[in-house]
Amino acid sequence: MTSPASSSPPSSVTDVHRIAMEKMTRILGAHQAERLMRKFLDEKSVLTTPDDLFAFATTLSNLDGIESAVGALLCTRAIMMGASPNAA
Amino acid sequence: MSDTATTPDDRVFRQLFDSMPQLGWTALADGYIDFYNRGWFEYTGTTPAQMVGWGWRSVHDPNVLPRVEEEWRRCIASGEPFEMEFPLRRHDGLFRSFLTRVTPLRDEDGKITRWVGVNTDVEDVRAAHALRDEMVAQGRDVTKMLLFMRSAKEAAEARVVELEAEIEKVRAAVSLAAYR
């Protein structure tokens, strides 16, 4: 039995960052996606783990408007990728 | 530019254009923009001097601008109405998507005298559609994952039944051996 490809763990750490950027870019546009990511990352250069993604998504979901909906989507995606919300 | 309008017709036109919620502008037949409404300057945070002629290019996304210019030039040459959706930079640097429609005005001989452009902010609609598409796609992924998990659970339960049967056989064999 094999896991569905879409819910498989990321093949590399950069997949987490790429998935987040792709989803945000499609919904919020490239400029807003880059702006939000830059604001969140601060010291880190990229999101590297599903827990990173979950933490970022939680921050987004606390914002107003459509960003909060994107945050909720990314929370679910992070859990599907193996994030452990209690540990994050 | 807007502050050069002097005739009564121009004043009425300016008031009409300034009162609408969209960004609006007019261009000469060759595409040179000679008027922007108040909404344009409020949204972009620019000045009439910065926008005169082809200054509008500075508030476009550089990645999209070549396609906009190409299509605008094509319409100027052909006289066809222009319609395109593209981002425009707000005064704070954020880009929002606008549906832009430009209509040619013609004289009695059919010659184009002006172009009238209206930019309508469609960012919220575009983002809502994109969000809907993402939710649908992710919903499908979640469904696939749940089906996979159910299938794995059923396989695990079947294996438990098999193991219990094997344990029962071993127990029976041990009991029989003890009896003998």
Image (cartoon, helix red, strand yellow):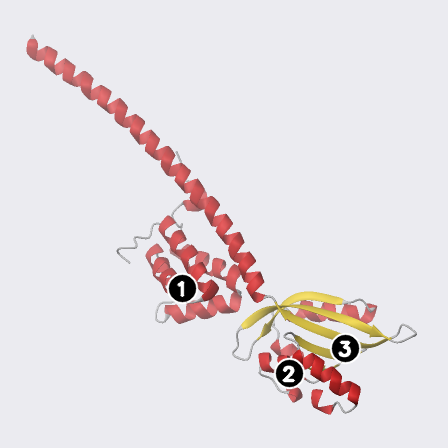
Instruction: Please identify the quadrant where the N terminus of chain B is shown.
Output: bottom right
Residue under label 1, please give it: A60
- Alpha carbon separation for disc pair 1 and 2: 34 Å
Q: Residue at x 66, y 79 (%)?
A: B19
**Identity, as a three-letter code, of the amino acid under mark 3:** Gly
- Do badges 3 and 2 share one subunit? yes
Label 3 resides on the chain identified as B
Residue under label 2, please give it: B38
Q: Nearer the viewer, residue B173 or A61?
A: A61
Residue A62 in the image: above or below residue A75: below
Label 2 resides on the chain identified as B
Q: Residue at x 26, y 27 (%)?
A: B160
Can you tell which mark lies on residue B144?
A: none
Q: Secondary structure at mark 3?
A: loop
> From the viewer's perspective, is B169 left or right of A40?
left
Residue under label 3, please give it: B31
Q: Nearer the viewer, residue A13 or B140?
A: B140
Label 1 with label 2: CB-CB less than 8 Å: no
The answer to whether residue A48 shows anywhere in this view is no
> From the viewer's perspective, is B173 left or right of B59?
left
> From the viewer's perspective, is B44 left or right of A87?
right
**Identity, as a three-letter code, of the amino acid under mark 1:** Leu
Q: Nearer the viewer, residue A61 or A55?
A: A61
Kindly report which numbered mark, 1 or 2, lies closer to the viewer in this rendering.
2
Label 1 resides on the chain identified as A
Q: Secondary structure at mark 2?
A: helix
Q: Secondary structure at mark 1?
A: helix
Q: Residue at x 63, y 75 (%)?
A: B21
Instruction: Please identify the quadrant where the C terminus of chain B is shown.
Output: top left
- Alpha carbon separation for disc pair 3 and 2: 20 Å
